[in-house]
Image: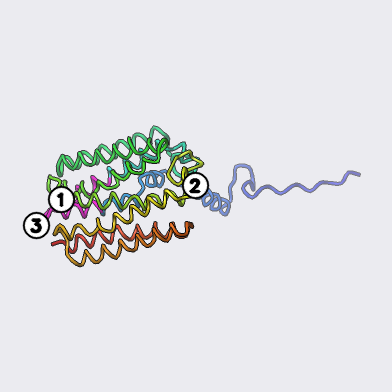
Amino acid sequence: MTQATAPKPLPTDAAAPGVLTTTDSVSSDLAESKRAPSLLSSYITLSKPRITLMVVVTVWVGFMFGAGAGGWGWLALGSTLIGAALSCMGASVLNQVYERDTDAKMKRTEDRPMPTGRVSVLAGWAYGFTLSIVGVGLLGLMTSWLAAGVSALTIISYAVMYTPMKRTTHMATVVGAVPGALPPVLGYSAASGTIGVEACLLFAVMFVWQLPHTLAIYWLYRDDFAKAGFPMLPVIDPSGSYTFRQILIGSLLLLPLGLTPTLFGISGLVYFATAFACGLLMLGCSLSLAAEPTRARARGLFFASLVYLPVVLVVMLVDRI
């Protein structure tokens, strides 16, 4: 006699054909939300909101210096910050659309919207160009065309010059420091319609600050950059000797450069003491990394650089003469 075979239980997500239980629906929705962020969140991620926030702060500092004793209006300030934010977001999007293939090869960027396909290439280009054009146009119409020109230069130097250069030479780091240092110049020119001494000093401080800041990041993620084929300095300098030398040079230059606003009569002694202390912090972390090149010390330099910039810029503004 043939023994009856017990039917195999159905999978939990198939209790009956075409039917999904409430519990299964919730579990499925949660799993789906983890696997695939919403389209809105993908577009927000593309715009790099944290970097945009830092850029907006530096634009604000430049604007306040540009306004000087002549006063300023909320409309001008708002237009400047919004225009700068849109321009920054546009440049970030264009950068990620261009680098979608290399981003897919790196652990820290493989989940970005472009390499995962959550945003199409055509949509990415359209999004980036729209943000950039609207941002530059808003600055030109509401503040000054000089500010719009600085914004356009920032986008071009970042998305058109720096981004492709990363694939061919480690000197891209120096070129990339230019768009990173232009935001306070943008703010200054939006408020005053000119580019004064304060704007030039802000540019110089931010330009030099970026060298140890960026090289610390590259050292932390050198294996990722090597996988993607980027010839960053820490990639082509495995021992790190040349990399650490450049970090030290940048930190040594930053220490006296950070004091120049007081020497030029732009800020007071409170700023001088603050900039000196922050400069010593950067230099100390750079020396520590050169002496013992560990991830922990590279991360320490990175965080020290994140402390340096907002503290120095805000105190410079508060303590201006």
Q: Quadrant of the N terminus?
A: top right
Q: Earlier in the sequence, mark 3 or mark 2?
A: 3
Question: Residue, x 71% and y 49% (percent of image)?
Answer: 9
Measure the C-alpha gap from mark 3 to mark 1. 15 Å
Q: Quadrant of the C terminus?
A: bottom left
Q: Residue 141's x, y, as percent?
A: 16, 40
Q: Is residue 74 left or right of residue 208?
A: left
Q: What's the amino acid at mark 1?
A: Val
Residue range of the region highlighted in magenta in the rendering:
58-85
Vertical placement of residue 135 versus 311, above or below: above
Which residue is the site of mark 2? 238
Q: What's the amino acid at mark 2?
A: Pro
Which residue is the site of mark 1? 197
Q: Is residue 173 magenta?
A: no
Q: Residue 21, labelled with which disc?
A: none
Q: Residue 122's x, y, as percent?
A: 39, 32
At mark 3, the secondary structure is: helix
Nearest the viewer among 208 and 3 is 208
Q: Residue furthest left?
A: 70
Measure the C-alpha gap from mark 3 to mark 2. 51 Å
Q: Residue 185's x, y, as percent?
A: 20, 47
Q: What's the amino acid at mark 3?
A: Ala
Question: Residue, x 33% and y 61% (percent of image)?
Answer: 307
Q: Quadrant of residue 149?
A: top left
At mark 1, the secondary structure is: helix
At mark 2, the secondary structure is: loop
Nearest the viewer among 170 and 242 is 242
Q: Residue 306's x, y, as percent?
A: 34, 58
Marks 3 & 1, CB-CB < 8 Å contact? no
